[in-house]
Image (cartoon, rainbow, N blue to C red):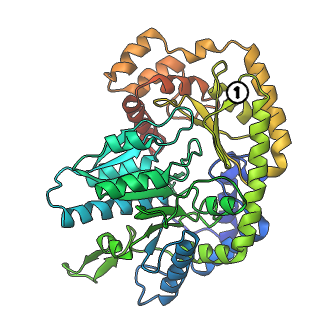
């Protein structure tokens, strides 16, 4: 690709942009069970209009753009209200769940440095179902993650096991409300008691559930307490760009005690340029995400969210019931909302994902890890609801056909590959994978089942290296 010599007209460019989407998953038809949060055409149009009305404004400087400041304060105020923060609660609007979690751990680390100088090797205690962004934050901020196995029936954190992992270097514990993979809500009240006993912070990761669980509870779904009012909970992350239906780039980190936010803010005037004061990671930032978020929250409102959650709950319950009638599939754990995953002891779930993809559906493969077997994740949204019967009919047919097909060969890693992969010895794991599967690592293959089965059998660190190499190649401009 060469840098363009001459400029081109907007119509032609917009058409070209649109045509690039042809290979994307078919989200607009409601056939995708991940990545997309769609509250319908009116909300979608408002999102686009509100976003573009603030596209150019720069949230970097709240004194030059008090509009962005006002929007952020109102949005965070609504989040604190929803999660029952006290009058001294505070928070920040961020670009996504990952940024919220990065900031939370940076705050925890800097607070520990300030208040507990005897802590030289800080660690956090996190259930194995905790989101990968906590591990990323640990890697960025030099914190040790202590990952604790969860209950294999419920996939919830086990308080006694979490407490056993705490020591005098622990600065924070994590609980999810809910976890992404299984939709399990950790026992936050019990974790809060442990954290108070050990004088450590408790982060409730409600990135995916923060705009869903409060409404589900209001509808009578049996969800344990998890918000800022629970004793011991010190910080909570919640995304607007998931079940809040905001445009992507909208999340929040909330602190029960607003003074904690002091540790989050970056301020620098020791250079020749303008003074930089950033409450969050980004510096220059469009006002689009916060404006679109503000407009969406105001447009949908509590009543609208209750309706959306009710629709999702019905659709998810119908799918779970339908899966219960398929002999080879089972739902992992005891999901109470619209996030869950399905596994099998007899058929290849990765082949099932591919067969469903061939019929125009997207369900999300997840590798086995610890006591969670290989599975397919579903996030059931309102836009999926009208297609539940069609989805179940296709899933049932694919499941039945897999029961008749022998795909065991696909699932077993060849012995010679096992030696290479299990040792992680070979530097060029991608080439080994290419030889094993015949798949060209420079292109995304149509079917992923053989690759996914190999990846599923690798130790996570080998898999991570290989996936990083693969993605590095994918983005290659050569
Ligand atoms: C529980 C949980 N935490 C954190 C994240 C990270 O959010 P993001 O992808 O917005 O960075 C997710 C994303 O799905 C999540 O489900």
Q: Which residue is identified by label 1? A: 329
Residue at coordinates 70% horizontally, 27% vertically from top-left? 329
Q: Residue 181 placed where, x, y %? A: 56, 42
Is 99 left, or right, of 18 in this rendering? left
Q: Is residue 114 toward the left or the right of residue 77 in the image?
A: left
Does residue 123 sit above or below 453 in this rendering?
below
Relative side of 301 to 477, left or right = right
**Percent position of residue 235, x then y:** 42, 64
**In the rendered image, the vertical position of residue 228 relative to residue 137, given as above or below:** below
Q: Residue at x 46, y 80 (%)?
A: 87
Residue 393: percent from the left, percent from the top?
Answer: 84, 34
Along the viewing direction, whichever of 199 and 467 lies nearer the viewer: 199
Residue density around tag 1, few if under 14, some if 14–19, many if 20 or more, within 10 Å: some
Q: Quadrant of residue 294?
A: bottom right
Q: SS for tag 1?
A: loop
- Among the 4 quarters of the image, the one containing residue 197: bottom left
Q: Is residue 24 visible in the rendered structure shown here?
A: no
Q: Judge whether 32 appears above or below 418 on screen.
A: below
Residue for point 34% across, 24% down:
424
Q: Position of residue 218 (x, y in %)?
A: 69, 63
Q: Nearer the viewer, residue 42 or 437?
A: 42
- At 59% from the left and 46% from the top, the residue drawn is 183
Would the CB of label 1 be found within 8 Å of ligand 1?
Answer: no
Placement of the C terminus among the 4 image quadrants: top left
Q: How many marks?
A: 1
Answer yes or no: is residue 109 visible: yes
Q: Residue furthest left?
A: 118
Residue lying furthest top in this view? Answer: 415
């Amino acid at each position: 690709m060469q840098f363009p010599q001459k400029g081109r007209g907007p119509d032609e460019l917009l058409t070209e942009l649109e045509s690039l989407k042809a290979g994307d998953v078919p989200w607009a038809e409601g056939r995708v069970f991940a990545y997309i949060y769609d509250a319908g055409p009116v909300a979608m149009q408002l999102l686009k209009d509100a976003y573009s009305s603030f596209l150019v404004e720069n949230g970097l400087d709240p004194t030059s753009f008090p509009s962005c400041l006002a929007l952020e304060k109102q949005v965070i105020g609504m989040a604190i209200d929803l999660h029952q923060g006290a009058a001294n609660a505070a928070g920040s609007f961020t670009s996504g769940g990952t940024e919220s979690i990065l900031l939370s751990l940076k705050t925890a680390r800097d607070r520990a440095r300030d208040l507990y100088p005897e802590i030289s090797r800080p660690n956090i205690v996190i259930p194995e179902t905790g989101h990968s962004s906590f591990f990323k934050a640990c890697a960025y901020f030099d914190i040790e993650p202590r990952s604790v196995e969860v209950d294999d029936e419920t996939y919830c954190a086990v308080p006694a096991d979490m407490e056993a992992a705490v020591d005098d270097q622990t600065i924070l514990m994590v609980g999810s409300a809910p976890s992404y993979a299984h939709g399990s809500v950790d026992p936050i009240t019990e974790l809060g008691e442990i954290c108070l006993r050990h004088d450590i912070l408790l982060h409730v990761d409600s990135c995916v559930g923060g705009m869903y669980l409060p409404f589900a509870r209001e509808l009578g779904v049996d969800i344990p307490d998890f918000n800022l009012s629970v004793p011991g909970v010190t910080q909570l992350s919640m995304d607007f760009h998931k079940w809040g239906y905001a445009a992507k780039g909208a999340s929040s980190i909330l602190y029960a005690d607003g003074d904690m936010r002091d540790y989050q803010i970056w301020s620098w005037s020791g250079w020749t340029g303008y003074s930089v004061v950033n409450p969050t990671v980004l510096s220059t930032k469009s006002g689009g995400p916060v404006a679109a978020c503000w407009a969406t929250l105001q447009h949908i409102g509590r009543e609208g969210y209750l309706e959306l959650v009710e629709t999702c709950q019905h659709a998810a319950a119908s799918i779970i019931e339908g899966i219960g009638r398929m002999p080879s599939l089972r739902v992992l754990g005891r999901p109470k909302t619209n996030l869950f995953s399905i596994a099998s002891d007899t058929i290849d779930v990765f082949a099932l994902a591919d067969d469903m993809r061939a019929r125009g559906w997207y369900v999300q493969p997840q590798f086995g890890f610890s006591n969670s077997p290989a599975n397919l994740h579903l996030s059931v949204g309102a836009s999926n609801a009208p297609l539940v019967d069609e989805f179940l009919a296709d899933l049932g047919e694919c499941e039945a056909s897999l029961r008749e097909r022998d795909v065991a060969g696909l699932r077993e890693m060849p012995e010679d590959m096992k030696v290479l992969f299990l040792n992680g010895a070979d530097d060029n794991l991608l080439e080994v994978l290419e030889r094993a599967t015949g798949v060209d690592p420079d292109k995304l293959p149509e079917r992923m089942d053989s690759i996914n089965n190999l990846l599923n059998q690798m130790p996570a660190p080998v898999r991570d290296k290989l996936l990083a190499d693969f993605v590095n190649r994918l983005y290659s401009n050569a």
